[in-house]
Amino acid sequence: TALLGLEARRKAGHDIFPLVITVPSWEVGTAWAEEMAKWELGWPEPVIHKGTRRHARLKELDRGKAVLITTYDTLRADAATSRSPLVKLRAATVIGDELHLIKNGDSGRSRAFLRIARPAPNLLGLTGTPVKHDTGDLHPMLKALFPLAWDDEKKFIERYCAKFEQDYGKPKVVGLNPAMTGEFFAIIERNHRRVSKLDVLPELPPKIYSERKPDIPPEWVRAYNTLAADMLARFPDGSELPVMTVLIQAMRLSQLASCAADVEMTMEWDGRLGME
């Protein structure tokens, strides 16, 4: 879909080259190259940007027809500063496959991607999991796609995220601000195209869900109950954990319900395979 959309823009008179496709692994990069050949777009053969000669090959590219495939980890090294060769290429189009890999806006990977993405008039972010941990994951992706609208992470979190302050560092995001849900979805839904798995891969069977609920050990049940009743968890080792707000209490209760279990490990000798 991304390739055909770009081809439509090219036929409409828009410049799409140089094109840089950033992928999570070289295997995925190979799949992109195969898809280009399959659809017979008439584009030049893509250059896999890896190896010790990659910078030399970069200088030999015809900017008007260049298609470059690189990985996020390679990009972190090759777009480390604004003077890096890959940044100076000034791509007309940047595709970020599995864009959620830049969800940490402070990482070198995210900063490198933003350096090549910011000047590009065409930018596509592709991901099936835009939120991996909390609503705050969205900001670096939105900043890459719409830098003028979503430049300030602090304002994004303040307006759209349910959070609590921590002693050090950024606030802890625990979800979407209920009061801003309507505005949030009204904006986000105008800026992305969501496709269901059923539409993309109808040949796959429906998902099958199974729940496994292990029992919490009794001493940890007592810790859970004391936290629920008194906002003070008393742990089996004698230590205590107070909480100061209902929001933090709910988070700690979720953690206590998820983390404690009795685990037994056994080792058996297999004469063919060795120790297992």
Image: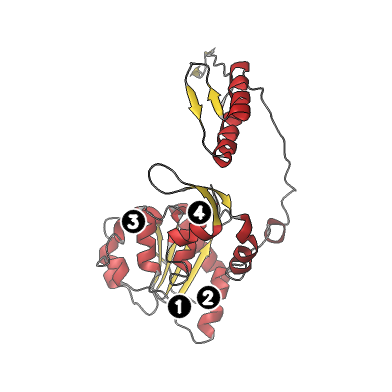
| Residue that label 4 marks | 136
The residue located at (52%, 68%) in the rendering is 37
Mark before the other along the chain sequence, 3 or 2: 2
Give how far apart the Cα atoms at labels 2 and 1 are.
Answer: 7 Å
Residue on which disc 1 sits: 16
Q: Which amino acid type is marked by label 2?
A: Leu
Q: Can I make out residue 16 in this image?
A: yes
- The residue that label 2 is drawn on is 6
Element carrying mark 1:
loop
Q: Distance from label 1 to label 3 (Cα)?
A: 23 Å
Disc with the residue nearer the chain's start (4 vs 3): 3
Helix, strand or loop for disc 3 = helix
Considering depth in this image, is 46 or 211 the residue closer to the camera? Answer: 211
Image coordinates of residue 84 in percent, x first then y, are 26, 65
Residue indicated by mark 3: 76
Secondary structure at badge 2 equals helix
